[in-house]
Image: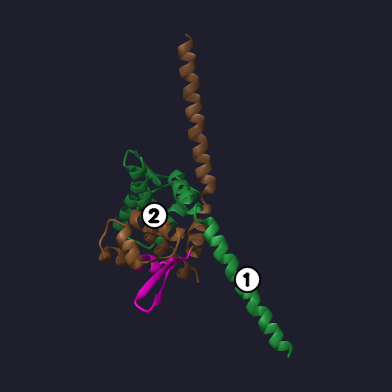
Chain colours: A brown, B green
Amino acid sequence: MVEYKEAALDDVFVALADPTRRAILARLAQADARVTDLAREFPISLNATSKHIRMLERAGLVQRTVLGREHLLTMEAAPLAEAAAWLAHYRQFWETSLASLDAFVTGRRAVARAKERK
Amino acid sequence: MVEYKEAALDDVFVALADPTRRAILARLAQADARVTDLAREFPISLNATSKHIRMLERAGLVQRTVLGREHLLTMEAAPLAEAAAWLAHYRQFWETSLASLDAFVTGRRAVARAKERK
């Protein structure tokens, strides 16, 4: 079960590691689309579009419904919840590091203001 | 700025798309470590460990401090906040799809119970 989850997370993060695939997901979040619609809307070939879609399907992020000669694509957001849950374990760390950065910037500003006053 | 952010997100998602790299991050979240510590703790070669660490550094998730002959590694969680922010845009979608699944399962159970009663 743990190994299955790890492999599923690999596929989701790989699928998200490309700006075109992220843009395809954003597009499908607006409305379902056919493969040919996406190939027309994105500045890439039909072949490249198909490859990106296969990686999204592999991660379970896109579902394909074959209607005669049309392949309709739907976004499936559930695997993103797994990725978000993994990241959530680290929230305390980035909140701490962003708070430190904030304190550092505030401190530098105070020093700068103190210098201006001299 | 957008392109920079997109490229940074690519690096973060690529870095997270491997179970060993996720485990290295989880280890560094506990405490800083030397490259040799990680190579000893994980069932992979020193060379493989170094490669994984370089991918984590490239994504800004690990910082290396050279102290004489020792290379001390520290987790930097801030880039994870960017990845979490990207995923958060899709929260409404996965919450909807998980709610649909929940309703489906509840419905199936009700049908099963009704059949049992017959």
Provide the chain ID for the residue under circle 1: B
**Left or right of B31 in this view: A55:** left
The quadrant where residue B46 appears: bottom left
- Which residue lies under the disc numbered 1? B103
Query: Badge 1: few (under 14), some or many (20 or more) residues near its Cα, within 10 Å?
Result: few
Residue B59 drawn at (x, y percent): 36, 48
Instruction: Report if residue B102 is visible in the image.
Output: yes
Considering every residue shown, the one lying at the far right of the view is B117
Could you tell me which quadrant the C terminus of chain B lies in?
Answer: bottom right
Residue A41 drawn at (x, y percent): 33, 58
Q: Earlier in the sequence, mark 1 or mark 2?
A: 2
Considering every residue shown, the one lying at the far bottom of the view is B118
Q: Nearer the viewer, residue A23 or A93?
A: A23
Provide the chain ID for the residue under circle 2: B
Instruction: Report if residue B40 is visible in the image.
Output: no
Residue A47 drawn at (x, y percent): 26, 66
Could you tell me which quadrant the N terminus of chain B lies in?
Answer: top left
In the picture, the disc for residue B13 is 2
Q: In the image, is residue A1 above or below residue A16?
A: below
Amino acid carrying label 2: it is Phe
Q: In the image, is residue B114 above or below residue B17?
A: below
What are the residue bounds of the magenta stretch? A54-76
Amino acid carrying label 1: it is Ala
Residue A55 drawn at (x, y percent): 35, 66
